[in-house]
Amino acid sequence: MRNKKKLILNQLNRKLEPFNKISKTIIPEKGWIFTIRKSLNMTLEQLGKRIKMTRQGVKKIEEREASGSITLNTLREIAEALDMKLIYGFSSKYDSIDQMVDLKANKLATKIVLRTHQNMQLENQANSNEQITKAIQDLAQEIKGEMRKSLWD
């Protein structure tokens, strides 16, 4: 089962990789629709005609995009009208999904091991720092291999 989960993560990493490159792109302050339309020297009326909408309707769409309240369907429709293609995806805040899972697994393992260590200290059965570090590493590997749901609590 571990190999299947690892394969799924690797496939996801490959699918998200192109988005990591474009995630650094700065979105224009007035949004892509306005910026592209203006760059193409296209009027509100011209874009409106392509999507069967009034000038005021197109203006509202541009405002909704700039405010972040536009729908994906509307963005697809506008992209088509601009002879473009909408690209939609997610980009990890980390270098990869693997790195994100590693960090989460280490955090969870540390929490579990230190809780156990604290109980053992109370019973005068404390472990050395090396033993604690090794236990955290081992548990983190186990958690990652199993892809425990508790990673996301």
Image: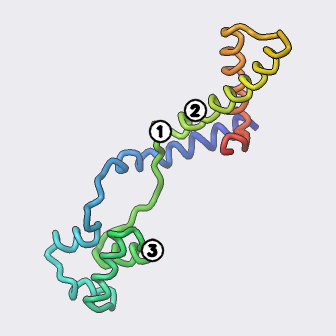
- Per the image, label 2 sits on a secondary structure element best described as helix
Residue at the image point whose x is 31% and y is 79% from the top: 81
- As measured in the structure, the alpha-carbon distance from the residue carrying label 3 to the one carrying label 2 is 33 Å
Residue at the image point whose x is 29% and y is 67% from the top: 31
Above or below: residue 54 compared with residue 84: below
Q: Amino acid at mark 2?
A: Leu
Q: Which residue is mark 3?
A: 71
- Per the image, label 1 sits on a secondary structure element best described as loop
Above or below: residue 63 compared with residue 143: below
Q: Which residue is mark 2?
A: 103
Q: Indicate the position of residue 101 as horizontal and vertical percent values.
A: 60, 37
Q: Which mark is residue 94?
A: 1
Return the residue nearer the eye: 17 or 128: 128
Q: Amino acid at mark 1?
A: Tyr
Are there few (<14), some (14-19), or many (20+) residues within 10 Å of tag 2? some
Return the residue nearer the eye: 21 or 139: 139
Q: Quadrant of residue 75?
A: bottom left
